[in-house]
Image: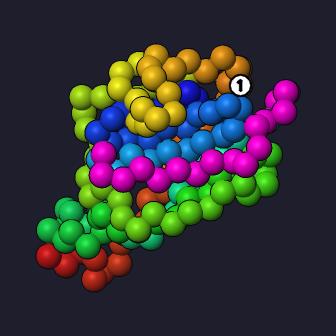
Amino acid sequence: MMLTSGGRFGGYGFYLKNGKPVWLWNMVDLERLKWEGAEALSPGKHKVDFDFLYQGKGAGTLAFNNFSGVGGPGSGTLKVDGKVVATKTMPKTLPMTLQWDESFDIGSDTLTGVNDADYQPPFRFTGTLNKLTIKLDRPQLSAADTKS
């Protein structure tokens, strides 16, 4: 496990399964969407990225009693060394934050797993993580988005 937030009842995990990079989204245990590379990583240093583009306005609309910004679709792209290895559309997302009784882990999964079919915690990453970057883009709200 390189990075995880959440677990069996909702969340995401970024890990290697049999050497293949995987990004898995657990939609509150109703559905699991998986982006997986077709090939195992070769020995050596690699850059593995997952980019998710949410197509809604985000939780900022809630401040204006407007729920239109949450729960919408998005698309994810998994890359290895700059090359796209998997792209998938997620038709819906969670309208609020992930559950608070799970963990945010780097380098292992310490509580429940996001996908019991792939691994069992504790699921430690045995390679070297030289850098982990998390970037959040916040959409700008229009005047129509701020009307209650």
Q: Is residue 25 magenta?
A: no
State the image coordinates of residue 102 (x, y, percent, origin top left). Answer: 30, 28
* Residue 78 in view: yes
The residue at the point 33 percent across, 35 percent down is 8
The residue at the point 63 percent across, 48 percent down is 36
State the image coordinates of residue 99 (x, y, percent, origin top left). Answer: 25, 38
Q: For mark 1, give the secondary structure.
A: loop
State the image coordinates of residue 140 (x, y, percent, origin top left). Answer: 41, 69
Residue 73 shown left or right of residue 107 in the figure: left
Which stretch appears magenta? Answer: 29-45
Figure quadrant of the C terminus? bottom left
Residue lying farthest to the front in this orientation: 117
Figure quadrant of the N terminus? top right
Against 72, is 119 above or below? above
* Near-viewer residue (130 or 78): 78
Q: Report the colour scheme.
A: rainbow
* Residue 54 in view: no
* Disc 1 target residue: 130
Residue lying farthest to the bottom in this orientation: 144
Residue 58 shown left or right of residue 126 in the figure: left
* Near-viewer residue (126 or 56): 126
From the image, give the main secondary structure of the stretch colored magenta: loop
Residue type at mark 1: give it: Asn
Q: Is residue 33 magenta?
A: yes
* Near-viewer residue (19 or 76): 19
State the image coordinates of residue 53 (x, y, percent, origin top left). Answer: 52, 63
Against 104, is 36 above or below? below
Toward which corner of the image does residue 58 lie, by quadrant? bottom left
Classify 10 Å Cα crowding around label 1: few (below 14), some (14-19), many (20 and above): few
Residue 122 shown left or right of residue 143 in the figure: right
The image shows a total of numbered marks equal to: 1
